[in-house]
Image (tube, helix red, strand yellow):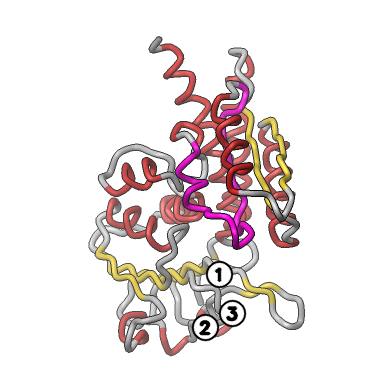
Amino acid sequence: MAIIIDGKALAKKIRQNLKVECNKLKEEGVNPKLAVIMVGDNPASKVYVRNKSRACNEVGIEYQEYLLKEDSTQEELLDLIKKLNKDKDINGILLQSPLPEHLDINKAFKTITYLKDVDGFTPASVGKLSIGEDTFVSCTPLGVIKMFEEYNIDLTGKHVVIVGRSNIVGKPLIQCCLQKHATVTVCHSRTTDLEKFTKDADILIAAIGKSKFIKADMVKEGAVVIDVGINRGEDGKLAGDIDFKNVEKKASYITPVPGGVGPMTIAMLMNNVIKATKEQQKEKSNF
C-alpha cells in the first residue's frame, strides 16, 4: 500500500513559513500585493479565485481583484495589464484562465512584466527555466517538485513519465524534472502504445484532465504516482486522472484528489508573490 503524499499538510506548512517572510517584509515597510484579473463569469474560475484570496489573507499578502466583462476586448485586457505593470504597489499579476475564446491568452501573458509574472507563464520565465536559470516557475510543476523534496523522493537517474503536454503543467515539468537529473518521457493524445511508457515509469505524473484514466495495470509496481488532474464526476465528487483506489495498492507513493497537488499549486502562487516582492526590492536598490 502506497504512502499518501499529503499536499494539504505540506501546503499549510509552506504558507506558515511564507507568513513569517511576509511579516518581515512588512516590518521593512514593504506590503506584498497580488492583482488577480478575471474575465467573464466562469464558475470554476470563481472558486479558484476565492481559494487564492483566502490563501493571500492567511499569508498576509494584500489582494486585489480586477473583473472584466465577458465581452471585453483584447485591447481593454492589455491596457489593464500595462496599468498594473506600472503600479508600484502591485508585486504580482495573475491572469485567471480560461479566457473567453475571442481573447488571445498568450498575447496577454507576453504583456505581463517579467518581475510580476507570479504564474511563470511569460516567455522570459519559460526561457529562463529551460536554460536552468533562477526564475518564476509555473505553480503546479513547482508544487510537484516541492512534494518530491519534502518526501525525499530522489529523481536522479529515475525515469519520469509525464502524461500531458500543456504549457501550464506538462512542458514546465519536463524542465523541472531534468534539473533534478531525471530521464524524462512526455506522452500525450497522439502517443501510440501509451501503456508501454506508463508501465516503464519510476515516477508517473498524470496531467490530462480525464477522470480515472490511468488504471492499475498501466502502472509499474512500486512507482511514485502524482495526480495533477481535477475532474468532477457525475456524482459531483472530485476525482483525479488516476484510478486512486486501485493504483494505491501498487504505488510506493501517491497523491490524492482532492488534497494532493491542488493545495500545493496555491501555496506556490503565494511563494512566487513573496519571491516577486523580494526581487522587485533588489531591483529598486540597484538604482
Q: Position of 37 compared to 275: left or right?
A: right
Circle number at residue 11 = none
Q: Nearer the viewer, residue 229 or 84?
A: 84
Label 1 with label 3: CB-CB less than 8 Å:
yes
Using a 10 Å C-alpha cutoff, classify the residue at mark 3 as few (fewer than 14 neighbours), some (14 to 19) or many (20 or more).
some
In whole angstroms, how far apart are the C-alphas of marks 1 and 2? 10 Å
Q: In the image, is residue 109 part of the stretch drawn in magenta?
A: yes
Residue tagged by mark 2? 213
**Residue drawn where x is 54% and y is 76% of the image:** 241
Query: Where residue 198 sits in the image (x, y, percent)?
Result: 36, 80
Residue tagged by mark 1? 229
**Residue drawn where x is 41% and y is 63% of the image:** 170
Label 3 with label 2: CB-CB less than 8 Å:
yes
Q: Position of 133 compared to 112: left or right?
A: left
Residue tagged by mark 3? 211
**Residue drawn where x is 68% and y is 72% of the image:** 238
Using a 10 Å C-alpha cutoff, classify the residue at mark 2 as few (fewer than 14 neighbours), some (14 to 19) or many (20 or more).
some
Using a 10 Å C-alpha cutoff, classify the residue at mark 1 as few (fewer than 14 neighbours), some (14 to 19) or many (20 or more).
many
Label 1 with label 2: CB-CB less than 8 Å:
yes
Q: Secondary structure at mark 2?
A: loop
- Amino acid type, mark 3: Ser
Query: Where residue 259 sits in the image (x, y, percent)?
Result: 63, 61
Query: Where residue 127 sits in the image (x, y, percent)?
Result: 32, 45
Q: Secondary structure at mark 1?
A: loop
In magenta, the rendered stretch is 89-112
Give the mark, 1 or 2, whose residue is nearer the N terminus: 2
Is residue 284 positioned above or below 58 on the image?
above
Q: Position of 272 compared to 46: left or right?
A: left
In whole angstroms, how far apart are the C-alphas of marks 1 and 3? 7 Å
In whole angstroms, how far apart are the C-alphas of marks 3 and 2? 5 Å
- Amino acid type, mark 1: Gly
